[in-house]
Amino acid sequence: MAKFYSVGVGAGDGSYITLGALRALEKSDIIAVPSKKSGNKSTALNIISKEFDTSKKELLELEFSMSSDAKERELSREKSAERIIAALKAGKNVAMITLGDVSIYSTCSYVHGAVKNAGFEIEIIPGITSFCAAADKARISLCEGGESVAIIPSAKGADLEKYTADFDTVIIMKAGADTDGIYEALKRRGMESNAIVSSRVGMENELIEPLREGKSYGYFTTVIIKKKGF
């Protein structure tokens, strides 16, 4: 029976791809490539292309809508799952690739249930997250001993003062458009020097630096806040 591989390809740099990910790609007949909109370039596909010859595999582009309409998002996920299941029913192994790790805000998680309910086996291949890669490049630890860590998807709607009070380390993903608000929230607690920004980690124009007020950052931006500082 065909098998579905849910593959985390790491953060930006082809060197972050694990041996497990490469083996899953090799075993697969089809590489499923998620995108926000049909025809968009895939960062995950670009990453694996540095270390793996994708020309030998069939590519299946899947559109996962980022619409504010929940029904539209759900419909796009259902359609993507149906296309994967159809390939599996045809006897083809499918590897769906995702940035970072499959368990951290991953597109792959949306199709796991449908594939499992269709009777197919799923193998999940973990990957290196952007915030782990950023912490290592910045030469800092995310947590030590009994320290606690919070991971939040964005600063929008988040009570940052509460998070920074309750946790030793706070990781804010997709933070590029909200860095000034994050800076102001930290300043109110006297913690404006306790944050590091990583932007496009592992990619071209990578930037890792202390959080600065009034500076613009792109989509692939993560902020790491340490209560005790660095």
Image: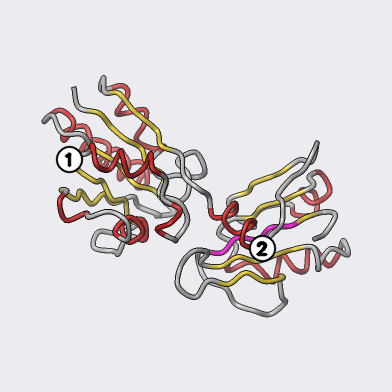
- Residue 171 seen from this side: yes
Of residues 160 and 108, the one drawn nearer to the viewer in this rendering: 108
Which comes before the other along the chain, label 2 or label 1? Answer: 1
User: Label 2 vs label 1: CA separation?
Assistant: 38 Å
Find the residue positioned furthest to the bottom: 214
Q: Residue at x 70, y 49 (%)?
A: 142
Picture coordinates of residue 53, whole percent (x, y): 22, 55
Of residues 206 and 148, the one drawn nearer to the viewer in this rendering: 206
Judge whether residue 206 is colored magenta.
no
| Label 1 neighbour load within 10 Å: few <14, some 14-19, many 20+ | some
Picture coordinates of residue 132, whole percent (x, y): 59, 51
- Residue 156 seen from this side: no
Instruction: Tell me the amino acid under the disc marked 2.
Output: Ala
Of residues 94 and 15, the one drawn nearer to the viewer in this rendering: 15
Horizontal placement of 185 versus 209: left or right?
right
Q: Name the residue under label 2.
A: 138
Instruction: Tell me the amino acid under the disc marked 1.
Output: Asp
Magenta stretch, main secondary structure class: strand
Vertical comparison of 171 with 220: above or below: above
Viewport quadrant of the N terminus: top left
Identify the disc placed on residue 29: 1
Q: Residue at x 40, y 49 (%)?
A: 9
Q: Tag 2, which secondary structure? A: helix
Q: Residue at x 23, y 37 (%)?
A: 27
Q: Tag 1, which secondary structure? A: loop
Picture coordinates of residue 204, whole percent (x, y): 45, 73
In this picture, which residue range is highlighted in magenta? 221-225
Dots 2, 1 in contact, CB < 8 A: no
